[in-house]
Image (tube, rainbow, N blue to C red):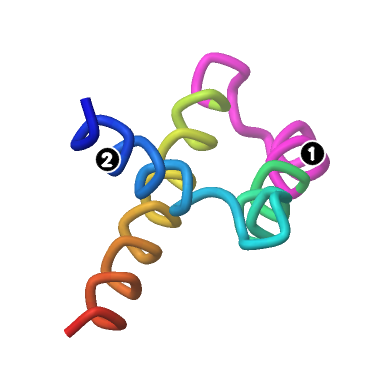
Amino acid sequence: MNRLKVIWSEFIGLFVTTAASPSPSSSGWLAACWLALPHLGIPPSLRPATLFVGLVVILADSAIRRAGDRS
């Protein structure tokens, strides 16, 4: 059970800063998608995929940075 808690806290730590607020990059990407995608001519069916891909990139970057901090 302790391992699950550690895994969960590490996962949440990728999206949430130490001040218990969403990371600025995740919030910025969400705002950018919400504000810009309707005006860029991207079809409504592709907007969720665009949001998802951006968040995956932010997650991967955050994971790589955290892994580098520990070594």
Farthest-out residue, top = 45
Q: Residue at x 60, y 32 (%)?
A: 42
**Placement of 7 over or under 64, stated as above or below:** above
User: Horizontally, is 43 left or right of 40 in the view?
Assistant: left
Q: Residue at x 61, y 51 (%)?
A: 26
Q: Looking at numbered disc 2 in the image, what kind of residue is underneath it? A: Ile
When asked about the image quadrant of residue 56, the answer is top left
In which quadrant of the rendered image does the N terminus lie? top left
Q: Report the residue marked by disc 1.
A: 39
Q: Report the residue marked by disc 2.
A: 7
Distance in Å between CA atoms under marks 2 and 1: 39 Å
Q: Residue at x 39, y 52 (%)?
A: 59
Residue 39, given in percent of the width and then of the height, sits at: 79, 39
Within 10 Å of the Cα at label 2, are there few (<14), some (14-19), or many (20+) other Cα atoms? few
- The magenta region covers 32-46
**Placement of 29 over or under 69, stated as above or below:** above
Q: Residue at x 31, y 57 (%)?
A: 60
Q: Looking at numbered disc 1 in the image, what kind of residue is underneath it? A: His
User: Horizontally, is 40 left or right of 6 in the view?
Assistant: right
In terms of sequence position, does the residue under pointer 2 or pointer 1 come before the other? 2
Residue 15, given in percent of the width and then of the height, sits at: 52, 49
Residue 18, given in percent of the width and then of the height, sits at: 63, 62
Depth check: 8 or 40 in front? Answer: 8
